[in-house]
Amino acid sequence: MKRRIMDLIQEKPWLGWAIFLATVIVVFLVGLFGASIMERRGEAQLAYQMVKPINDWEPRNEVWGENFPREYETYSATADTSFASKHGGSAKIDYLEKYPNLVILWAGYAFSRDYNQGRGHYHAIEDIRNTLRTGVPQPGTCWSCKSTDVPRVIEQRGAADFYKDKWANLGSEIVNNIGCQDCHDPKSMNLRITRPALIEAYQRMGKDITKATHQEMRSLVCAQCHVEYYFKGKEEKYLTFPWDNGFSAEDMEKYYDGVEHKDFEHKLSKTPILKAQHPDFELYMTGIHAQRGVSCADCHMPYRSEGGVKFTDHKIQSPLYNIANSCQVCHRESEQNLINNVHDRQDKIEELRGSAESAIARAHIEAKAAWDAGATDAEMKPVLALIRQAQWRWDYVAAANGVGFHSPVESGRLLGASIDRAQEARVQLSRVLAKHGVTGPVVLPDISTKAKAQAYIGLDMPKLIAEKTEFKNTVLPEWDKKAAARQAAMPKEKK
């Protein structure tokens, strides 16, 4: 064979040059490939090189930032709340002002006082301190998803003791905003679950969360908080996810009915209401992105490169702010077409949502009229069951972020079911009212603005605002003073 090749080269000298050039090209490509591997390995080592080892349960994001400046810089950018999309973003929206019917739907519950669009993780502590909702005595459980201090305190005291304490008692302990420790192991930087409720919910479902893949963890760390939950036990207030029967709205409703849970009794209709929290993860699980294996981080924390280093953008935000790095990684349509696609779905969900809110608000007001006319518990029981079901299905969609975009089909189905149950409740109410001599339509009050709706349900807003102002001027400085002294004594790096 060797002689044959030599013979061929002697016969055709150009063949020798061709073999030589082909060899040079192959060697060059192999060298390039090897250099790329070494560069990526170097990047990986550089990306996770600890300049200063971090203590277990270190809550201060700026301490983590000394090791991971790119991630910390992008995380700090979440302080910017100027982005507003057509239906969301991080800019402040006063939802009670925008949707006055919400005041009626939550009559008798703290959300009727104050409810704004979430401004993001960077503002979690400031916002929970300032909201009028925390003017009502709350358990320690309310801090669970607001701070990197929560895993630290739970580690010290145990989850049960943390949950059942009073919210006000923990004010000086919980001061650092949601951040690094909530999702990362300080030694390996691997994603980890720091909230017991998610682990416990998986265990009750017979699942081992430690077997989750890295891609699954890129959603599960979010599911520590962006889920439906309730505080179990009158005194214990133990944070519990109602997933024992499954993830759907009906599955969780069955769980709540089984344990006879209610978040509050409605002030007007006396309905035992379920208040949905923010079931983002559950709604996402019914959508096409989850079915295709796309994680929360893929869209809300896309990868980016800087100086040849690939890292995760920790400016957690609406994908509409950064379509090139989020949507267009998979979708090849133009940016404007993708925005139009999102808005088209959200517009339809908004329309259905408005119809549901209007029907449920009317049902509450008409139920009050029925009670005032002398309706009995037996007459009202089936009506209140329908109102409870209607409001749960509406809230399951309304309380989730994204205006239904995480699963537009499921959101539309639930809002349709909500409207159907609310209107059926109103039909039954008309019969009850007629039985007690009210044959004409119930005259609806003027609830066209937040202020008018709050006045109708009897809220003394000047008094509530004055009480919050006093709290901010007297209590918060003391919390901050104690927290500063405690944190000054904490070592900044592992010894």
Image (cartoon, rainbow, N blue to C red):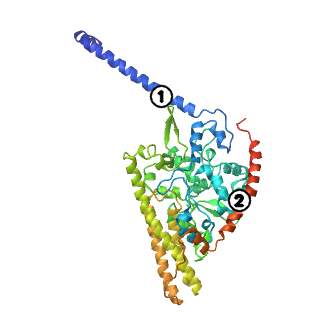
Q: Hey, what amino acid is under mark 1? A: Ile
- Quarter of image, res 243: bottom right
Element type at marker 1?
helix
Element type at marker 2?
helix
Percent position (x, y) of residue 251?
Answer: 51, 65
* Quadrant of the image containing the C terminus: top right
Name the residue that disc number 1 marks: 37
Marked residue nearer the N-terminal end (2 or 1): 1
Q: Hey, what amino acid is under mark 2? A: Trp
Q: Is residue 30 left or right of residue 205?
A: left
Percent position (x, y) of residue 475?
Answer: 75, 57
Does residue 345 show up?
Answer: yes
Residue at 25%, 13% (x, y): give it. 14
Which circle marks residue 167 in the picture? Answer: 2
Q: Residue furthest top?
A: 10
In terms of depth relative to the viewer, which is nearer, 110 or 1? Answer: 110
Q: Are marks 2 and 1 in contact (CB under 8 Å)?
A: no
Q: Is residue 445 above or below residue 494?
A: below
Percent position (x, y) of residue 53?
Answer: 67, 35
Q: Is residue 228 left or right of residue 162?
A: left
